[in-house]
Image (tube, coloured by chain):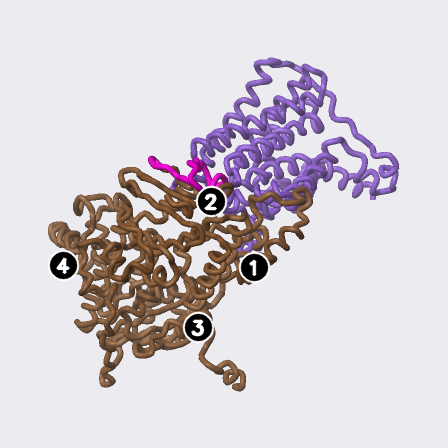
Chain colours: A purple, B brown
Amino acid sequence: MDILVNFLRLVLLSMVPFVLAGQGTMLGGRTGVFNVAQEGMMLVGASLGFLVSYYSGSIFLGMVAAMLSGALFGLALAYFTTALKMDQFVIGLALFFIGVGLSTLLPKIIIGITLTPPLIKTLPNLAIPLLSSIPVLGPILFNHNILVYASVIISVGLWYFLYRTQKGLELRSVGEHPMTADSLGVNTTKNRYWSTIIGGALIGLSGAYLPMVYSGTFTEGMVMGRGWLAIALTFFGGWSPLPILFGSLFFSAVEVLAFRVQVIGSFLPYQFLQMLPYIATIIVMIITFKRARVPAFLGLNYDREKRSV
Amino acid sequence: MDNQTILELTNVRKVFGQTVALDSVTFSLRRAEIHGLLGGNGAGKTTLMNILYGLYRKDEGEILHKGKKINIQGPKDAIRQGIGMVHQHFLQIGNFTVLENIILGTDIDNRYTMKTQNEEKKILDLCQRFGLDVDLNTTIDTLTVGTRQKVEILKALYRGVDILILDEPTTNLTPQEVDALFESLRVMVNDGLSIVFITHKLREVLSVCDRITVLREGKNITTLDRKDASEEVFVRAMVGDKMDIENSIYFATDQRSSFVNRLDQAAAFEMSSVSFINKDGIPRLKDVSLNIHSGEIVGVSGVAGNGQRELAEIVTGVIPVSHGKILLDSKDITHTNNQELFKTGIAYIPEDRLHDGFLPKANVAQNLILGHHRNQPYSDGNFINWKTVFKETREQIKEYNIKTSGPEDVGGNLSGGNIQRVLIARAFSMPSQLLVAHNPTRGLDIPSMDFVYQKMLKRREEGYATLLISEDLDELIRICDRIAVIYRGEILGILPRSEFDKYAIGRLMSGIKEENPATEEKALP
């Protein structure tokens, strides 16, 4: 029983990077901007979030810095694809490489090489009064750091925004058929910029979660493919906030399980478990292929005066 | 300017790259009139209205609204000035509901909860007032073209426009739906709206418009009151002086003699009980039986997407037959591949010229022999004889009036209309038992359309068979000997020329069979 409680607690704890990066990708994608730079952006978020926390002593400032760096990457992606109409994948991959390079370069310049890794204080747990003392459910659900709660609130908030507000309707229309949106006076450019910038901020924050909760320090390549998994997750979740939230639980469960197997050892190599999320994504996409809910204009740039649509 | 004029465009000019789309065009619209904007393909009708609606920027010219100069930067400005537009290719979001499509981009009363009772009530009022019947909660994808058009009109009316632009609104509507549309338009005009009706169909403007402006090659030719002008004046204005209207088929009014079915002769082409089931397991053609005699033109009519494309591709061997049998000249060609069919005598003008019929990076000569490049005289079986190819294609370019610098010109340099001419030249220049033409005149101006008709009738005289699949019912009625109507992959009826009737065909197009067969069918076990 204890093992199960502990396992479920860990699943919730490690779902956060998936939720934030997945929702960030989804938000940009809903206006048609397909971000593929998550891995790089998360690394920069982790690196910068760690550095700022280390020097300022404030984890909050570190989070803000990580979000700003992600937002800046988002802005760059939006500018190159919306204003300059360049290919989204090419720009996304370029931003990924820039992110990878920048994330290792920054600590080397600022801190240099040290024998013992510099450490920051990790995020404290916030036990919710009363609820956290419920047996079994209390420790699983209500004794976590603030970003666990925030990631759930953000997901539900995004769902409400997209499906229950006028601005959300407009945003979705841009990713489905920008020409229609444009012809009805919806500002396609503005929607694309804001969704990509805010989505970028979420992705940056998801990177910062790693040093702030897991390790207390930044190590090279510490995102370990979670950025790529976030892309798979958004497809898995049909580019919709709530399914993405539940999908992250699954992705996170597999991650925790793979980690366990790696530590305890098993007949099954842990690498196989690490493949599971990708395989699951492919299976889900095959099953839902005919009804795949992918924004119709995903990955494409919109040009009003191009004569053929 | 009289005080009735609500809108005026003066000296509008628009250039796309090297082509002048509009050259100092002037247009005026009065309150409560239906103003027809008539012209062939490429005349600049849509471009002019896209400028008015803010989708394109004009290079020169002015727009006056109620006497005041206005500046339209985008559709938002146009909507604010009370201008709405119904596009030919509907601007709708397929997986949104009707309601969402209508209210998109407007201010909703409860914008943070999306409780839309007020909006729904307003839309339902409009539906009732103008006789536009739509269920607000269905998804756009599931609707027919006719209903989607009502949604498009509601979108404009909901925004409280007093000027409504309709771009080729009758494309893909059955004749019954066209009548209903015209009735709604009349109600709107009586309500004080002004309507611009863009079309290339002369008969439609004559039946519904109060005033008519004719555009040709980006210039405005004339504006006339409907009652002051005869059909002939408009015909001349539309096509210019070059075309020989007396002998044209497009404007022909006399009845052509009907095809005499020589019963002693076997059909040149025979399809019996052919079905096609696509990759997703959905039947797209059901039990289609159709035969075409030598010297006959058989038309296939239907609303787009009812299996026409599959029919064309089955006959030409592009996709495999699921069940059934096809004979050409009494030879079984059911499983013959496409390459063999081209050799044995099938020519094909595909519907989607850019995807299925043309290589933009190859030159014009290569495009003109594509598919026939293995046959005499272009090839001896191993090598292509380029000297012959260039000689022949140079002649084709002249005969088919393809605007290009020569056979070496890269295909991508050609305009849409000229690409269509290449496809037509290719199909007609090789002798073929059967020609399958799918929307062959799409994107062509009237003289070129007429040219295609002449060519088809020439084939008919020479005793070759033609299958003409078209979304333009007028076109089919003009030149076909028989018309088969396709609905959801089934041939619902085949009418001989003596029984051609727009409304009868229209009923079949919308899936309504003749009196009472439904009950008879049910009686069968």
Label 3 vs label 2, nearer the camera: 3
Q: In this view of the protein, can residue B356 be seen by the observer? A: no
The tag earlier along the polypeptide, 4 or 1, is: 1
How crowded pointer 1 is (Cα within 10 Å; few <14, some 14-19, many 20+) is rated as some
Q: Which residue is mark 3?
A: B507
Label 2 vs label 1, nearer the camera: 1
Q: Is residue B435 above or below residue A281?
A: below
Q: Which residue is mark 2?
A: A179
Give me the chain letter of mark 4.
B
Q: Label 4 is placed on what type of residue?
A: Pro
Q: Which residue is mark 4?
A: B377
How crowded pointer 4 is (Cα within 10 Å; few <14, some 14-19, many 20+) is rated as some
How crowded pointer 3 is (Cα within 10 Å; few <14, some 14-19, many 20+) is rated as some
Q: Residue furthest front?
A: B3
Q: Label 1 is placed on what type of residue?
A: Cys
Q: In which quadrant is the C terminus of chain B drawn?
A: bottom right
How crowded pointer 2 is (Cα within 10 Å; few <14, some 14-19, many 20+) is rated as many
> Residue at the location (53% across, 36% down)?
A192
The tag earlier along the polypeptide, 3 or 4, is: 4
Does dot 2 land on a helix, a strand or a loop? helix
Does dot 3 land on a helix, a strand or a loop? helix
Q: Which residue is mark 1?
A: B127
Across and down, in percent, residue B399 comes to 15, 55
Are the residues tagged 1 and 3 within 8 Å (C-beta)?
A: no
